[in-house]
Amino acid sequence: MKKFSFEVYSAADIVLLSNIKSSFYNKKDIKRLTFNTINIFYIIPVVTKFLYNLIIKKNFKESFNIVYLKHVINIINPKVVIGDDLDNRIFKIKKIFPKIKTICYQFSFIIKDEINAYKKILKNKEVDYFIVFNKKMKNLVSKIFNAKKTKIYIGGSVRNNDQKILKHKKIYDILFISEFRDLSYLKKNISSSAFKNFKKRFIDSEIFFKKISQYCERKKLKLCVALASNRKDKSFSKRLKKLESDYFLRINQKINFDNETAYFLAFKSKIIASNYSNLGYELQAMNLKVFFHQFIKNNFNKEFEDLFKNKKKNLT
């Protein structure tokens, strides 16, 4: 769901493509561009350019989003652009503005079932620097990118390393990390094999939550759910947020919801329950107590086993 901004952009050396506020976002010469925001001030020139391309030049390749991106980048005129591998804008900027230095970082874990889809995302793409979680990912990414054009470095989770470790009074006994998605939407927008895998994970997660919920009710423990729709890296509408909260309330009407981020809630909880969520592994790397339960054993692969042995080395 698109949001509107009224900020007048000025020149900056660095552009950060992210929906999550970084610790260095407020530093001088850094601008943050979120993927779900349209700036009102630039609507008229962008629409004019888009229609000109469409009607006069018969250019049907440049979408409105591309014209908007080009316009904004020209105004800010950055020397460096930073973005994650799941945000296609970082690759578009490198293609349109080859002189701008681009730094791409791995956003989340790529499990065995997701490798082929991940290769398609990166195919024929180019950036100057790529930061990955570990050696395994470096080997994978090295086979996709041209080594002469893209330098690949192991740096752990850039996103997770940017999070501050907080000290907070424990309010909740257990925090459950939601992996809720709208299945009806996914069925229409992803491949049948990807949907099949995701549906299995969704069912596993529901079974896991029911077990956790029953345990908390029996032991009179305070259970909180970190809603996926509260995460800034997700583009959720109000309708989907209600869909998610109603889903969990149908299972347990006594659970707690909080509008705080999952990171903040984690520091307010004694233990975190996670199924397949990337967030679970990141919180575990921050030395928080995380309980993992996965019904499909082959998804819990060697990469994750190594993380538990060398969590600081790989993620922080």
Image (cartoon, rainbow, N blue to C red):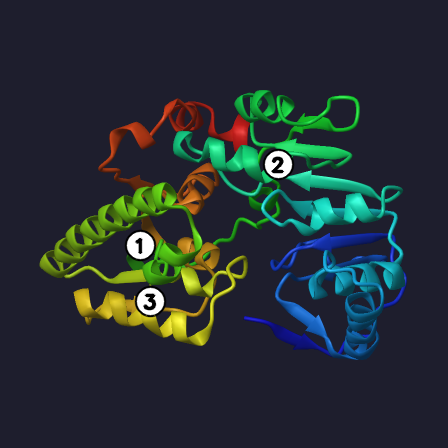
Q: Work out whether mark 2 precedes mark 3 in sequence or the reverse, and give the earlier one.
A: 2
Dot 1 falls on a residue whose secondary structure is: strand
Q: Is residue 26 visible?
A: no
**Residue position for label 3:** 244
Label 1 – label 2 distance at C-alpha = 32 Å
Q: Nearer the viewer, mark 1 or mark 2?
A: 2
Dot 2 falls on a residue whose secondary structure is: helix
The front one of 282 and 63 is: 63
The front one of 188 and 137 is: 188
Q: Is residue 237 above or below residue 31?
A: below
| Quarter of the rendering occupied by the N terminus | bottom right
**Residue position for label 1:** 176
In the shown orientation, is residue 267 left or right of residue 214? right
Residue 71 percent coordinates (x, y): 83, 64
The front one of 105 and 113 is: 113
Residue 43 percent coordinates (x, y): 77, 77
Residue lying at 70% horizontally and 61% vertically, measured from the top left: 63
**Mark 2 and mark 1 in contact (Cβ < 8 Å)?**
no
Residue 144, image quadrant: top right
Q: Work out whether mark 3 precedes mark 1 in sequence or the reverse, and give the earlier one.
A: 1
Q: Nearer the viewer, mark 3 or mark 1?
A: 3
**Residue position for label 2:** 122
Crowding near the residue tagged with mark 3, few <14, some 14–19, many ≥20 C-alpha atoms within 10 Å: some
Q: Nearer the viewer, mark 2 or mark 3?
A: 2
In the shown orientation, is residue 43 left or right of residue 284? right
The tag on residue 141 is: none
In the shown orientation, is residue 267 left or right of residue 249? right
Q: Is residue 232 visible?
A: yes
